[in-house]
Image (spheres, grey):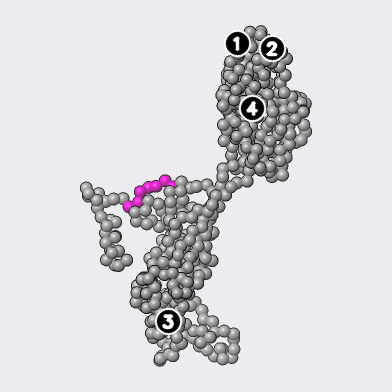
Amino acid sequence: MSLFARLLQAVRSWRRGRGGIRAVRTAGIAMEQLDHRQMLSVTFTGNVATDFPATQTPGVVILPDNANVQHPVIGDPALANLVGVSGFDINSLRVSYSPENNGTLFLGIEQPANPNDPLGRPVIASDADNNGNSGTVNPAVSALGLGVQDPADFGGTEFMGVYLDFLGTGTGQIVAGFSQNVPAGGAAKVFQVATASQAGPNVAPTFVTPLPQFQGNIYTQNDPNHPNMELSIVNFDTLYQQVTGSPIAPTAVFNVGAFAGSAQDGPISEAFFPAQPVLLSAATPVPEVCPPISPPILINPHEHRIIDNAHGDLVRVYVQGTSGFDPSTIDPATVELNGASPVATKPYQFPRSPFPSQMFAFRASDIDAEPGLQTLTFRAKTFDGQEVISSNVVVNVPNSAQASGRLKFLMNRTGQSQYNSLRRLAASNPDAILDPSILGGAPTSGLAASVAPARVNLGPATAAAASVIVNYSPSAVQGPVDLPRQVVSIPTAQSGSKLPSRLNRSMADYLDQVDAPVEDHDLVLSGAH
């Protein structure tokens, strides 16, 4: 872009609109940071088989029906014909665990299919007479005069829940669900997590001391499309350690059982599901790591994507933000560009872009790249561990300080200005300098300083080498010096690299000029010469 075009673009970007009000260059944007992991949680819908899929292994543990399970018995034949299956019956449990947020245990109580339902859906939890409504009684059932009642919302003596045996004693220490106790004053019954009292291994436990700090969510609906009870226990890691005295580990094993029933459902007995072991690692889903974030990056856009890794120039990489990614969340300690670590970083705002960017500066000599057209890869991680990988194409022109003509114009070399900008940044924001040695090793004056090597290698120590005196001042060279021809090899289209024709011509002009006299400041001592 010509100087005139650049000035015109700058003027247009700041031009006042109609009404004399200048347009705001950057509006405030709320950026949503995407999570790089699948959320390890169960969404309750009242369908245990769907919410706790059997195919999720590891991640879901299914405790199956067995001969030790006590299913409700309907003691009256006429009532049995009308009810078919009690709403307190239990035929399996499903368990899942999330290690996030101090651990959460998810539990689903699965119930048998309803023989009275034409779609074969499970019976509604707590629907004592199985009439499709857990808060009413079938008139035909009432007509039998057996005293069957069905209070809504686990009212009265209705109860249902799970119990946990952490110690392997055969009885539970923790219980969760709706208790057998009838609330005083007709208050609604609420979900509880509490300490348990269990008289024996085949007896339903009772709720003793409430533990609200471990109370998660409960799902119950009086709906045949969402018939099952599902619940969660939060801060499960702390609960486990309080009961066992040991921190939780993937190898931890605890026992889970369930119970349900009512003292108001007439000749229908209660359900009891004896505890079965659960291995924590088997109940823990493996998180699915999302693909790395790949934000757009610009490499040395101010120099038309040309770099020179033969010298200590600064290469700037701009990581652009998007609506779902804030580049300020990148951890500078994890940043790498083809083997190079950044020496400085700071926020950057592109004109007319609604999203902030982040600039990272690299020492060009640290970048591992061959001459010619190259793809450089930017790698990093965010502070929360999300991987960031992005690439862009550059042209690597080693020894570019000798360039002239069109190539030198494209590279926009200004000698000391790169390090002067770095020093100003260090003065205004010291935290932006990631490698303070870059300031001590920065050139002190002129273009020669920006391209001179930090040290001279004279090869193995010899008697001849010991007498060599090197003077870095321009007066070191007092007369004409017969310098060897310096050759820079740049792959072109003929040798496999595809370059734009205009840049190819400028590089060809540069190669034609390497026979020109080399000034003193371009002198590089080498034992090979």
Is the Cβ of the residue at disc 1 closer than 8 Å to that at disc 3? no
* 322 sits left or right of 256 in the view: left
Q: Neighbour class for label 3 at 10 Å: few (<14), some, many (≥20)?
A: some
Q: Is residue 311 visible?
A: no
Name the residue type under label 2: Ala
The residue at 39%/77% (across/down) is 508
Q: Secondary structure at mark 4?
A: strand
Instruction: Return the residue nearer the eye: 62 or 349.
Output: 62
Kindly report which numbered mark, 1 or 4, lies closer to the viewer in this rendering. Answer: 1
* Residue 177 marker: 4
- Residue 157 lies, with reference to residue 342, above or below; the image says above
* 164 sits left or right of 460 in the view: right
Q: Residues in magenta?
A: 25-31
In reply to whether residue 28 is colored magenta, the answer given is yes
In reply to whether residue 148 is colored magenta, the answer given is no
Q: Sequence-wise, which precedes: disc 1 or disc 3?
A: 1
Kindly report which numbered mark, 2 or 3, lies closer to the viewer in this rendering. Answer: 2
Instruction: Return the residue nearer the eye: 234 or 495.
Output: 495
The residue at 27%/57% (across/down) is 12
Q: Position of residue 405 (x, y in %)?
A: 34, 77
Residue behind mark 1:
139
Secondary structure that dominates the magenta span: loop
